Image (cartoon, rainbow, N blue to C red):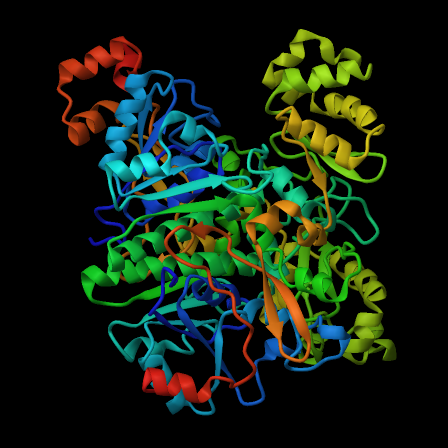
């Protein structure tokens, strides 16, 4: 079964800040060709490495972002021009304006540019990392405890949001091209991508002038907080079926004042969240994480285990859905790759082995006539 | 002006956050998004503005009573006039309502149906209940976003809803492209857990290959290794600066920008490897410097020297004091039908030829019930009035009287 974007040619000039865009388009079935300089992409030097030893074909960082793509090495600008002219889409992360000539290659070409702050504006030449973009986009300020530092995310989520938005912009531009016959420029800013991925921060400010701050694990809505169990942590949730939750706690003779009907009011639970979670914490301490997670879900209460990410690898639900895709690395073994972020009934999601540098030099040039 | 989703109509059963994030992006791109709501819909205050307005921007609101068979029938008839039907209920809700993909496909063969659930439509946990924070906990974010050796901390908000919402928009766009090429619609099964699992990153490959246990690393770099790298306290209350130094060139620029104090010449900091080994010491020394600095001034100073540095922006920094976001029009002022102007979030990216843009503020509850039933289903005014009287539909106009 082909993918939804099968037949589409994407030239990927992006570094790690834009690498997810091509990965998503490749997953959707596009022919995504990563352009590497002679000697290979700099992403190949980023750890961790397979068995710890640096090697350009063994960077797990590169593997993650390059899975599903093909690779060509381009030694000259002329070569790059030929490849770009044969593509439907180019994704690039060069400083603003550096690759402006791309748009002159073909009126149908779609160029997606991912830069720290965007193509125009007073900060257009400023630099960022994933952490700096998270900071300036507003993600960091609200993560962490009130008396500790703001905390960055697990994973390069500024880069990831930018990659998702670039992919959306590209497919939107493809749909528009069907009408207009013309390509266009998709301008993605890491900072703006983060700012567009906040939940409450700008909305509350614009409505009330409130500046949300950090509250540790207490969610801004005040309906979620992490609690300690006998063998780990659990995410409490006081939305959902309150009666079932409080009946359970009552049976354990741990409800304290939670039997008071006042707690049936969702706003009361919000206002008095600290006390509520303190009572639930004392109750949770008698259980294991698994007992609470499973017991809650049986009662349709949205609790969850607080797990390390590797728990995903052993999750029976994800296993039954085939989320991880085994990819054979010749000579090294089979590696389970995270797979589709969604399943489409009429189209496949593609994950293939990340390419060796220049592995498809001949094939791509023959197929693309570049 | 042409928009990418001109002529595309979306029947939107989504609520809370994740689903509305998907459909607001579709509205930005020109789709006619018809939000089907219940009479007592959950809102975050003013529906035109603020968080609700931002989530519902550019959409139309129709209130249907799906507890009444006539309400469900209207929903089905509307679906038959739409290109995309989307919901983010638990897995069984749309099936129980008779609004599942197989039913809708019988009404319109090429329909695109997107089901955004916590865990997907298959698998042993398909009926589990979830919210963004619980999905973040299951996927590892809550545990690993913490200071080294510290207890779980995680996001202060539902990043999962935003991530899944954006990926949902990608799914819709790709499915519409597929339909244009093949003439076929399809069912998209989007498990929000799988979205956040797909975004965790290379650490999953590392654990798969090498085993071991992931430990929180605070604000250390998760891309190229480097030090100093982190978030440093500045002068004033709750002012912080993120600084990233990867290689030697970055280091030389930082040293020069801060006036090359004696400690920067310490032989322990000579190479990237040495700086990484001394990251804790460096963090303390850099923090001593930043603690005397104004965050905004230090950011400008370091950026002028070519160092990646940025203040940890709070809501006011973002919404009022950021000339870059302002230059991009990130928070547009949107006129309302009442003659007000509300400032809400705009589209997350810029398109040069067919700009994504906010088509309007959030709708009032049932603001478009009459217009949609009239225009799409051809219901005469008398029939709509009867439905309003029977509580099958609610319109803002009838609520006002």
Say above or below: B71 vs A290.
above
Image quarter hosting the C terminus of chain A: bottom left
Image quadrant where residue A145 sits: top right
Tell me where residue A270 appears, x and y as whole percent.
Answer: 64, 22
Q: Nearer the viewer, residue B80 or A233?
A: B80
As rendered, which of B72 and A18 lies closer to the eye?
B72
Above-or-below relation of A29 to B160: below
Q: Quadrant of residue B399?
A: top left
Percent position (x, y) of residue B261? 80, 72
**B126 or A148: nearer the viewer:** B126
Q: Is residue B367 visible?
A: no
The residue under the point 20% across, 27% down is: B371
Quarter of the image where the N terminus of chain A is located: bottom left
**Taking A156 as reference, is A55 above or below it?**
below
Asked whether, in this view, residue A103 is left or right of residue B282, the answer is left
Residue A11 in the image: x percent, y percent? 41, 75
Q: Residue B386, can we see it?
A: yes
What residue do we see at 52% from left, 70% from top? Answer: A352
- Looking at the image, which residue is at 24% across and 29% down? B77
In the picture shown, does residue A298 fall above or below A318? above
Q: Say how many tags the image has.
A: 0
């Amino acid at each position: 079964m082909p993918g939804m974007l099968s037949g589409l040619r994407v030239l990927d000039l992006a570094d790690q800040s834009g690498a997810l865009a091509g990965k998503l388009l490749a997953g959707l079935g596009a022919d995504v060709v990563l352009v590497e300089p002679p000697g290979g992409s700099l992403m190949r030097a980023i750890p961790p490495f397979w068995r710890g030893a640096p090697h350009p074909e063994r960077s797990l960082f590169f593997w993650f972002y390059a899975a599903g793509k093909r690779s060509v090495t381009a030694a000259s600008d002329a070569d790059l021009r030929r490849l770009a002219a044969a593509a439907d889409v180019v994704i690039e992360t060069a400083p603003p304006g550096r690759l402006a000539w791309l748009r002159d290659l073909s009126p149908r070409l779609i160029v997606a540019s991912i830069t720290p702050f965007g193509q125009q504006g007073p900060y257009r030449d400023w630099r960022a990392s994933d952490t700096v973009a998270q900071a300036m986009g507003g993600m960091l300020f609200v993560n962490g405890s009130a008396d500790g530092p703001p905390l960055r995310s697990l994973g390069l989520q500024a880069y990831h949001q930018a990659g998702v938005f670039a992919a959306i912009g590209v497919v939107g531009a493809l749909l528009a091209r069907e009408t207009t016959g013309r390509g266009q420029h998709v301008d993605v800013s890491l900072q703006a991508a983060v700012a567009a991925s906040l939940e409450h921060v700008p909305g509350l400010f614009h409505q009330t002038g409130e500046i949300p701050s950090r509250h540790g694990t207490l969610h801004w809505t005040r309906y979620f907080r992490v609690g300690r169990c006998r063998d780990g942590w659990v995410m409490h949730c006081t939305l959902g079926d309150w009666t079932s939750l409080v009946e359970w706690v009552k049976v354990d003779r741990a409800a304290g004042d939670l039997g008071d009907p006042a707690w049936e009011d969702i706003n009361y639970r919000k206002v008095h969240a600290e006390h509520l979670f303190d009572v639930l914490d004392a109750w949770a301490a008698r259980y294991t994480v698994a007992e609470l997670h499973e017991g809650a879900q049986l009662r349709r209460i949205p609790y969850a285990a607080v797990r390390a990410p590797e728990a995903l690898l052993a999750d029976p639900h994800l296993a039954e859905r085939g989320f991880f895709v085994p990819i054979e690395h010749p000579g090294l073994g089979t590696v389970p790759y995270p797979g589709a972020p969604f399943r489409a009934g009429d189209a496949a999601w593609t994950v293939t082995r990340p390419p060796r540098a220049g592995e498809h030099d001949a094939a791509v040039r023959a197929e693309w006539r570049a | 002006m042409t928009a990418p989703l001109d002529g595309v109509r979306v029947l939107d059963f989504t609520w809370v956050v994740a689903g509305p994030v998907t459909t607001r992006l579709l509205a930005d791109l020109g789709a006619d998004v018809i939000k089907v709501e219940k009479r007592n819909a959950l809102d975050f205050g003013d529906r035109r503005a603020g968080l609700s307005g931002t989530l519902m921007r550019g959409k139309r609101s129709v209130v249907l009573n799906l507890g009444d068979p006539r309400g469900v029938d209207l929903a089905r008839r509307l679906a038959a006039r739409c290109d995309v039907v989307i919901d983010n209920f638990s897995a069984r809700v749309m099936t129980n309502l008779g609004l599942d993909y197989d039913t809708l496909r019988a009404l319109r063969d090429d329909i695109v149906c997107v089901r955004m659930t916590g865990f997907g439509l298959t698998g042993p946990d398909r009926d589990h209940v979830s919210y963004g924070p619980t999905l973040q906990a299951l996927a590892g974010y809550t545990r690993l976003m913490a200071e080294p050796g510290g207890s779980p901390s995680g996001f202060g908000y539902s990043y999962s809803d935003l991530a899944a919402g954006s990926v949902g928009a990608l799914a819709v766009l790709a499915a519409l492209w597929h339909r244009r090429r093949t003439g076929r619609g399809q069912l998209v099964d989007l498990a929000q857990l799988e979205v956040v699992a797909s975004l965790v990153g290379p650490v999953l490959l590392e654990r798969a290959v090498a085993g071991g246990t992931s430990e929180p690393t605070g604000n250390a770099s998760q891309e190229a290794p480097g030090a100093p790298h982190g978030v440093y306290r500045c002068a004033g209350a709750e002012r912080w600066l993120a600084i990233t130094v990867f290689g030697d060139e970055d280091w030389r620029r930082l040293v020069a920008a801060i006036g090359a104090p004696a400690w920067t010449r310490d032989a322990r900091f000579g190479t990237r490897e040495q700086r990484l080994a001394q990251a804790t010491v460096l963090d303390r020394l850099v923090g001593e410097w930043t603690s005397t600095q104004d965050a905004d001034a230090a950011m400008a100073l370091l950026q002028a020297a070519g160092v990646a540095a940025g203040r940890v922006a709070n809501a006011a920094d973002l919404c009022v004091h950021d000339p870059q976001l302002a230059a991009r029009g990130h928070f547009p002022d949107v006129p309302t039908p009442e003659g007000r102007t509300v400032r809400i979030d705009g589209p997350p990216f810029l398109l040069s030829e067919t700009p994504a843009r906010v088509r309007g503020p959030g709708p009032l509850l049932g603001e478009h019930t009459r217009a949609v039933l009239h225009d799409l289903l051809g219901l005469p005014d008398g029939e709509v009035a009867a439905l309003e009287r029977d509580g099958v539909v609610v319109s803002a106009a009838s609520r006002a009287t």
